[in-house]
Image (cartoon, helix red, strand yellow):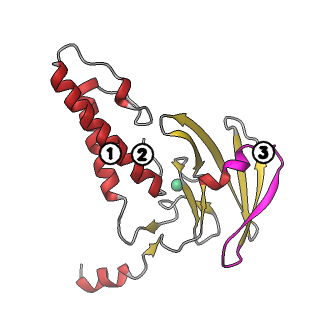
């Protein structure tokens, strides 16, 4: 493929920076309000998105966003793990839990992945790398089947492991987990399960 093609293609990439978004943390009050509650979000540019709180089978609360006649339902989730109480928006297109949702070209409000948005700086990469490291270290110490939403700090020492080595490795995992959570707080790409 000619080099020029790639250069031309790059111009059509849409970047997240500056894109209007709805953050899951802003939906805390929606989660806690009654079914039928409605209102709107306003962006600095004056764009208004209406929402209505609905109930749907299998979800605690669903926010139905509406902009220019286009409706997008997005379930709101609350998790209570060692991260503390956290709110999430579920992307109606891929059903992954996200910390923010964006507009696509059709005025639907979905996740950055489904909306085809990219990070200009690719800042999500270090977090993905750390997540991989945590998973690898945890797998070695405690085996498969753990959720990264649970802190590993209460996990017990495997019988075959020396205390000294175990404590050292556990501390290393804790350090990585802390780093990872801090990155998640700053980002909007949600958790990869
Ligand atoms: Zn999605």
Disc number placed over residue 80 in the picture, else none: none
Image quadrant where one finds the N terminus = bottom left
Element class at badge 3: loop
Q: Residue at x 35, y 70 (%)?
A: 121
Circle 3 or circle 2, nearest the eye = 3
Mark 1 residue's CB less than 8 Å from ligand 1: no
Tell me the residue at 16%/23% (across/down).
164
Q: Separation of disc 1 and disc 3 at Cα?
A: 34 Å
Q: Position of residue 90 (x, y in %)?
A: 58, 48
Lower position in the chain sequence, tag 1 or tag 2:
1
The region drawn magenta spans: 28-47
Please indicate whether residue 79 sits to the left or right of residue 31 in the image.
left
Quarter location, residue 187: bottom left
Please say if 20 is above or below 137: below
Horizontal side of 50 relative to 124 (left or right) equals right
Mark 1 near mark 2, Cβ–Cβ under 8 Å?
yes
Give me the C-alpha separation between circle 3 and circle 2.
Answer: 28 Å
SS of the residue at dot 2? Answer: loop
Q: Which mark is residue 192?
A: 2
Q: Dot 2: few (<14), some (14–19), or many (≥20) neighbours within 10 Å? A: few
Check disc 1 and report the residue beneath it: 131
């Amino acid at each position: 493929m000619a080099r020029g093609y790639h250069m031309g293609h790059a111009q059509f990439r849409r970047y997240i920076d500056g894109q209007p978004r709805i953050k899951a943390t802003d939906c805390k009050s929606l989660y806690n309000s009654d079914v039928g509650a409605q209102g709107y979000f306003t962006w600095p540019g004056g764009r208004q998105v209406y929402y209505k709180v609905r109930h749907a089978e299998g979800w605690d609360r669903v926010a139905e966003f509406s902009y220019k006649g286009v409706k997008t339902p997005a379930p709101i989730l609350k998790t209570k793990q060692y991260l503390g109480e956290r709110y999430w928006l579920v992307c109606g297109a891929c059903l992954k839990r996200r910390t923010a949702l964006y507009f696509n070209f059709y005025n639907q409000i979905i996740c950055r992945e489904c909306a085809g948005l990219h990070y200009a700086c690719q800042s999500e990469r270090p977090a993905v790398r750390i997540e991989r490291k945590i998973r690898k270290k945890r797998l070695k110490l405690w085996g498969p089947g753990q959720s990264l939403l649970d802190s590993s700090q209460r996990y017990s020492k495997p019988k075959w492991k020396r205390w000294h080595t175990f404590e050292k490795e556990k501390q290393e995992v804790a350090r990585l987990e802390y780093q990872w959570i801090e990155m998640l707080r700053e980002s909007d790409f949600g958790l990869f399960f």
